[in-house]
Every structure is written in C-alpha cells, then in structure tokens.
Image (tube, grey):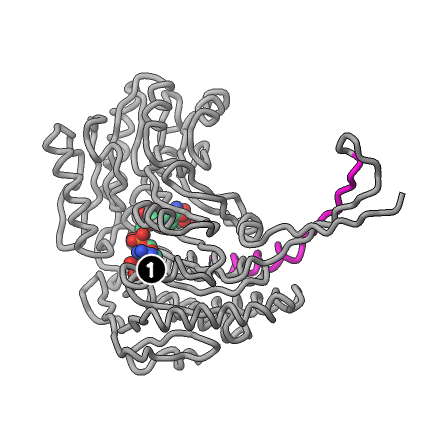
Amino acid sequence: MFSDIRNENIYKNLVNGQWIETNTKKLIDIKSPIDQSLVGSIQAMSKEEVDAAIQNASEAQLSWRNVPLNERADILYKAADILDKKAEEIANIMVREVAKDKKSAVSEVTRTADYIRFTADAAKSMEGESIPSDPFPGFNRSKISVVTREPLGVILAISPFNYPVNLSASKIAPAVVAGNSVVLKPATQGSISALYLAKAFQQAGLPAGVLNTVTGRGSEIGDYAVTHDHVDFINFTGSTEVGKHISQITAMKPLLMELGGKDAAIVLEDADLDLTVKNIIAGAYSYSGQRCTAVKRILVMESVADELISKLKTKIEALKVGNPLEQDQVDVVPLIDTKAADFVEELMREAEEKGAKLIIGGNREGNLIYPTLYDEVTIDMRLAWEEPFGPVLPIIRISDRDAAIKIANASEYGLQSSVFTKDINAAFYIASKLEVGTVQVNNKTERGPDHFPFLGVKSSGIGTQGIRYSIEAMSRPKAIVINLAD
Ligand code: NAP
Ligand code: G3H
C-alpha cells in the first residue's frame, strides 16, 4: 500500500497529494550508519521545487482551515491507526536509516500514534472564551470579547535525525488539527522514515497540499525555505547552531525551537543510589545518548560519589553494545555518522589530556563509541559544557547544593535537570533555582508524557511544545468584540 512513495529504491516527495520525483534528478544516497549499505535514495529538491511546495501548501490551507474540526480530527485518528498497523514496517526502515534498535524504533512509531490520537482529542476539547469588559477599571458591561483560535497559515516543520517519525509528527499533527498546512523538511538522514509518516497522513485522507514534503540538504535549501514569504511559522527541532542561524536570518517569523541540551543529574547525599543509577544509565546511554534530553553530566556530592561510580560501572558493563540489525534491543549503537563520532572522540581526548579519570569505555570502533564514564571532570574541560550527543558521561564532584546549582546554571543550555534525593525540601530548593524548562525529581530527564509542557530556556529553545501547548503555539487568538448598546 505504501509502494507509491518510491520508484524502486528512489524515494519521492509528497506535493499537492502526488508522490513526485524532482526535475533536477539530483539524488542523495542514504547509507546506513550501521554498515554503510544503501537504505535508499532521496530527492535533492531545487529551490524552485521547494517554492512550488510552499505555494501549494499556502493555497491548500485556505480551504483546509474551513474543514470542521471533527473532520480534521477524524483524519488524525485514521493516521494513528495506520501507523500502529505499519509500526513494524516503518521501524525496520528506521533501524537501518538511523541505527535505532528495533524495540525503540517500534516504540517511537506507536508513541507517535498515541501522540496523534491525543492531539485530536485535545483539539476537540479546546474551547474559546468570552471576556466581559467590566473587570477593567472605567468600563461597564458594554463590551464582550469573543475569543476563538485561528490557524497561522503555512507551518515549516524541520525535524532532526534522532526521532525522524515522532519529531515530525509532533509538529504535523498539532499544526493540521489547528487548520494550518505543513511543509515538512526532515533531516536528510531520517528522510525515508519521515516520508513513510507523510504517507500515513495522506492515506488517512489529508487533502492534497495540506502536507507537503521537501527533501534535500538543509545547507542547500534550508535558508531559502525558512525565509520564504509564504512560510508563516517555523517549528524546528535540531542543534542550537542551526537554530541560532535560523533565528538570525528570519525576521518577523514566529519560531518554536527545541534545541540542544546539557542536562545535569544532581545526586545528593541521601539519594536512593539504586534508583539513581537505573535512571542515569537509561537517561545517558539509550540510543547512545543521541537524545536532546539525555543525561549529559552528573553533579554528585563528594560523600556518595565513590559508591555511585562503582554502581554505575557495574551497570555500564551490562549494557548491550553493537549492531541493531543483530539484536532487537541494543542500548549503545553506532553514532549517526563519522563526523559525530569524531566530535565525541575529540571531547574524550581533551578531557583525558586535562586529567579526567576514565572509569570505563573510552574506545571506538568506526562510528561505535563504547559507553564511557569519566570521573574527576573539571570545569576547564569541554566535556563539562558541550553536548557530545554520544554515550559519554562526565562526573563532576560537588561539595554542596549551591555548588551544584551554580555549575548547572553556568551552562549555555537550559533544557532539563534531574535531582535525586529523598528530601522533598532539598528537591524543591534546587528545582526552584535551576534555569531549565523542566526539573525531574527522582527520575531521568525525558520529554514524555507528551502532553506535558516541553521547553528549553537559554540556548535550548524558544517556546513550548507538548500537545495542547503545540496547538496553541501554532494558532493565534482572534477577538471579536461585541459592543452592546448602553
Ligand atoms: P541539525 O543538524 O541541527 O539538523 C536539524 C534539521 O535542520 C535537519 O532537518 C537539517 O537538515 C536542518 N537544517 C540544517 N541546516 C539548515 C538550515 N540552514 N536551514 C534550515 N534547516 C536546516 O540537528 P541533528 O543533527 O539532526 O539533531 C541533533 C541535534 O538536535 C542535537 O543538538 C540535539 O540536542 C538536538 N535535538 C533537540 C531536541 C529538543 O527537543 N530539544 C530534540 C531532538 C534533537 P539536514 O539533515 O539536511 O542537514
Ligand atoms: O531528542 C529529543 C527528544 O525530544 C527527546 O525525547 O526524552 O522522549 O527521548 P525523549
């Protein structure tokens, strides 16, 4: 049923309800990070073709915005059901395309189906409001503001490689249910998985042009797309570097951005260390740490540091490392590309040169970086501040809570933090002072459940995601004021 999205191994783009090939005939080969085998080829669209896709989305939105909400929601329910049915097929592509292990890939697709259903439910339960004038001084009851929500127009959704289905759908579903049309520009490595998602929406009955896809290198078509006159809103997830660049070159375009992070796990003297270790291991090493919300540094009280490290080491030794094609559940897989692995290695070597103590790991085979833990990391090391996006975890020992808060807040990032303690007062003291979007008490840093607000402060983002928050971000209030006769 999904066969029309490709011609042999060449994947097409969805534009105006048709799966088309680029006129330029320029292709990008997508090779698996696991073994460099060819997963498929995607189209490198020209700027003219990107322009046509955006124009088409703009025209389609004019009628889509008038489709009743219950009909828009029904299409989302159908898309969710299709994804559930296609979970295995899409996951098999994702395993090869982004080297995600099969269990996590299936879970990404089914989580996406749940996300889409919840989005339809949330949109149907959102209501407008009417605001009387008399609470404001000097006004009697002569005015009522009837406030409804309006779509914004064309949403440019730009997604990263690490959740090619989920972080595309978490932009598309809230956007279209609010009456917008979407142009999806997926990460090049991740495009094929994202095109399967687009097919699910099309098959569910999304009208022509309401979702268009554009593939090609961000470095070639990105600037053109983000500055296009008919793009009304940019919903971007990716690196802080690209996010900052987009915010610099776009003017008067509203942005929703989820960017990088350096999430700290703060471990106090009274923490339940077994619970702490379980969470840090899952938080830091799953999918090789290629998650914005991965635990990316540990700030631990000196008095419990040795015991924590010993327990962490035991659990790291038990992690499954290797090829996700050979086993369904692997914690540490090859990184997305050689450049990513080179960067992680650079951070490790610099830390070692400056005196970090290697507890375990530190080695590499091709793009596979073995799970690595460093003790005695100090604030003059890049590893203390930079986001490796790899399975490497630095430990910084601290003397008291305020030192932990100070180091945590000295980061340019502010996505999430964890605090591990049995003392609720200590947890609240620290949580209230951390400059992040979310603080997790006695849990790993993580985005879900997906209806919670999810946001980064400082260089970690602009605006708030989360199902209702995303619908609100991609719509605006419209006030109609009824002026009553006195
Ligand atoms: P990336 O390199 O920034 O790419 C993200 C997306 O931007 C891709 O689709 C990319 O296309 C596109 N792009 C590149 N240059 C562009 C330009 N000039 N204009 C418009 N789009 C452009 O990020 P990534 O490597 O895919 O993902 C890893 C990063 O994302 C990490 O820093 C991670 O922390 C962050 N992330 C954050 C969150 C969050 O919610 N906070 C979630 C996931 C990931 P190409 O692939 O074609 O270059
Ligand atoms: O990579 C960024 C994702 O938004 C993280 O989501 O916490 O569910 O892995 P997650």
Q: Residue at x 63, y 50 (%)?
A: 477
Q: Which residues are magenta?
A: 110-134
Instruction: Identify the element where label 1 is drawn.
Output: helix
Dominant SS type (magenta): helix
In the rendered structure, which amino acid carries the disc numbered 1? Gly
Q: Is residue 191 visible?
A: yes
- Looking at the picture, how far across and down is residue 483, in whole percent? 81, 47
Q: Residue at x 24, y 37 (%)?
A: 314
Q: Which residue is disc 1 drawn over?
A: 222
Q: Is mark 1 within 8 Å of ligand 1?
A: yes
Q: Residues within 10 Å of mark 1 (few under 14, many from 20)?
A: some
Identify which residue, 235 or 166, lies in the foreground: 235
* Image position of 324 with respect to 275: above or below: below
Q: Does 371 sit left or right of 16 as displayed?
A: left
How far across and down, in percent of the image, does residue 186 sit? Answer: 36, 62
In the rendered structure, does residue 72 fall within the stretch colored magenta? no
Residue closest to the eye, 153 or 401: 153
Q: Quadrant of residue 305?
A: top left
Please tell me in which quadrant of the rendered image residue 235 appears: bottom left
Viewport quadrant of the C terminus: top right
Name the residue rendered at 58%, 50% in the picture.
472
